[in-house]
Amino acid sequence: QGSQQDVLKAQVEISKLLERLEVLEQRRTIARAAINSLISRPAESPLGPPEDTPWAGVRYSLDELQQLAQTGAPALRVQESEVERSEESVKLARKEYYPDFALGFTHVQRDDQPEMYGIMVKAKVPLYFWRKQRLELKSARENLVSAERLRDNAATTLQYNVRDAYTVASTSQRMAELYKSTVIPQASLSMESSFASYQVGQVDFLSLLDSVLTLLEYQLKYHESVAEYRKELAQLEPLVGVELPNIQEAAKQAPRGKWSAP
């Protein structure tokens, strides 16, 4: 009872899915080569299928992550070390204004004569301190100011990066939960209703096809949200200097309808 147009339309949609599979296969090949290069293996080495691990929200709040970043971020610790080094340089430059004292002791042993002992005291006074010491102190202070500015800039950039990654991760988490609990079940019911209506001639083929593709898109968006969430966690870890395990109760797998993409 269907028309030839419906059959051709179905073939077109199948061709689109095959095209998408080719693009995804290309992306998978590139990702596999990138992963192998990171672990010093040949680009074509097999990695096996990815493990479908459960996931849940991160236990830290934004304020807690900001505090962790300020104390544990490797990049910020480097800048703090530079500030401390510059502070020591300033202290050493100031000491150049003070006289240098030296105390020496000598002992001379001679044949058939009494031994001789001597004590020597030296003092080096920086009379022309404005020629050298003042310039060295000025240079050390400028280096300290520069190091402090670099540290403050690194702290500001770090704070922004943590907030950005946390915002994206939180949004992706909420979107994934929305797709899993609400959108996908509703799309699945809509598709099942379209199937039943199409079989009795109450819905045309295009409406049925639209409900099938809509369910597919929502399923893909769910997994994209989960992947985006995990990627942002991976971006956060080097920023805060600690691992961010998912310690909450694992979420269930995304619900599926009777039809799903191969």
Image (cartoon, rainbow, N blue to C red):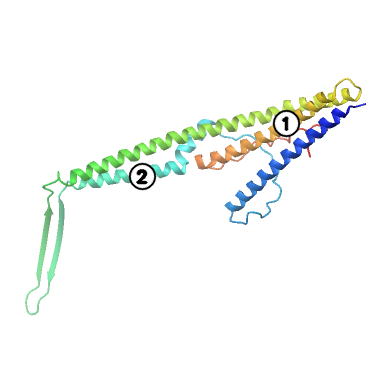
Towards the viewer: 74 or 1 = 1
Q: CA distance from mark 2 to mark 1?
A: 51 Å
Q: Residue furthest left?
A: 113
In this rendering, is residue 182 above or below 120? above
Q: Is residue 194 left or right of residue 82?
A: right
In this rendering, is residue 174 above or below 144? above
Q: Nearer the viewer, mark 2 or mark 1?
A: 1
Residue 118: name its quadrant.
bottom left
Residue 166: name its quadrant.
top right
Say if mark 2 contacts mark 1, CB within 8 Å: no
Q: Quadrant of the N terminus?
A: top right
Towards the viewer: 109 or 189 = 189
Q: Residue at x 84, y 26 (%)?
A: 192
Q: Earlier in the sequence, mark 2 or mark 1?
A: 2
Q: Amino acid at mark 1?
A: Glu
Q: Quadrant of the C terminus?
A: top right
Q: Is residue 146 left or right of residue 164?
A: left
Q: Amino acid at mark 2?
A: Glu
Q: Residue furthest top?
A: 202
Q: Residue at x 43, y 36 (%)?
A: 155
User: Percent x, y for residue 97?
Assistant: 17, 46
The residue under label 1 is: 217
Q: Residue at x 36, y 44 (%)?
A: 82
Towards the viewer: 63 or 181 = 181
User: Percent x, y for residue 212?
Assistant: 79, 29
The residue under label 2 is: 82
In this rendering, is residue 25 above or below 160? below
User: Percent x, y for residue 41?
Assistant: 61, 56
SS label for mark 1: helix
